[in-house]
Image: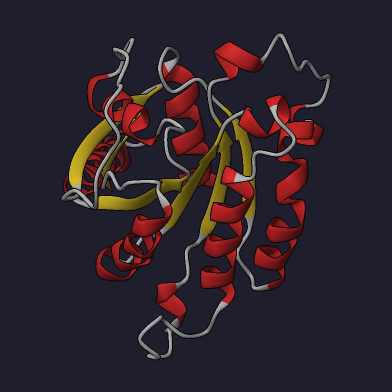
Amino acid sequence: MSLLTGFAVVVTEAALAIYRKLHAVHFGVYGATMVGKTTLHHQLRTRGEVQQIKERTVGRHRASRKYVKLDGDAHTLKTADIGGEAIYWKEWLKDMRERKVKYVIFMIDHRHLDNDSNMDHQIAWKFFVDAMINDYWPDGKKKKDADFPLAVGIWANKYDIWGEKYPTDDILKHEIFEPFKYGMSKLNDRGIPCFKYIVSAKSDPEMVYKGIFTMIKDY
């Protein structure tokens, strides 16, 4: 490699690093109440053990920037903390529309495994999927191609709590994802790929960051 070529590579890498720091990648973080969305936001901002968060998020908070680094790579993200109760689900759509969200993390936990009658995640997931595959926004305006996310990650959170209770040799075939397969199929048919992932947002920042970087890199 010549000196001139090497200099050009260094300049290009520096320019790319500056671009990634200034240009935020918009992520939407949605899911049922008490699933760990606020904890994930804190983890992206602070990196480390997150203290127990007992308060429920009310409404939609203003989106904020988070600078994340992993193995020498770095990106600036922008996420907004939004409540997970049914009265706030339409705020998820407003968030996606206003910020032009490119990647969605839909969070679940193990409550449907502990209790077969608990449908918190399934109901929220159906609302989300139906809204995503619809060609129109709730106000009747037709969506543009850029309004659809590049990918949806369904993240099974609190692995540190349920991992030993519900073990598996193949994470991608874990029973925790079973109730969401039909919705993932509908999203795939609409041209929106899905990414299954297992995470401990409270205690394992590396799992969180790997999931983020995988979505950006692969989709």
The picture quadrant where one finds residue 191 is bottom right
Observer-nearest residue: 111 or 189? 111
Horizontal relation, residue 176 to residue 139: left or right: right
The picture quadrant where one finds residue 50 is top left
Q: How is the image coloured?
A: secondary structure
Observer-nearest residue: 174 or 110? 110
The picture quadrant where one finds residue 75 is top left
Observer-nearest residue: 68 or 103? 103
Horizontal relation, residue 137 to residue 50: left or right: right
Horizontal relation, residue 21 to residue 107: left or right: left
Q: Position of residue 184 (x, y in %)?
A: 69, 57
Quarter of the image with the N terminus is top left
Observer-nearest residue: 209 or 28? 28
Q: Position of residue 179 (x, y in %)?
A: 74, 46
For the image, the number of numbered tags is 0
Q: Position of residue 181 (x, y in %)?
A: 76, 51
Q: Which residue is located at x 31 percent, y 51 percent?
A: 25
Q: Which residue is located at x 67 percent, y 14 percent?
A: 163
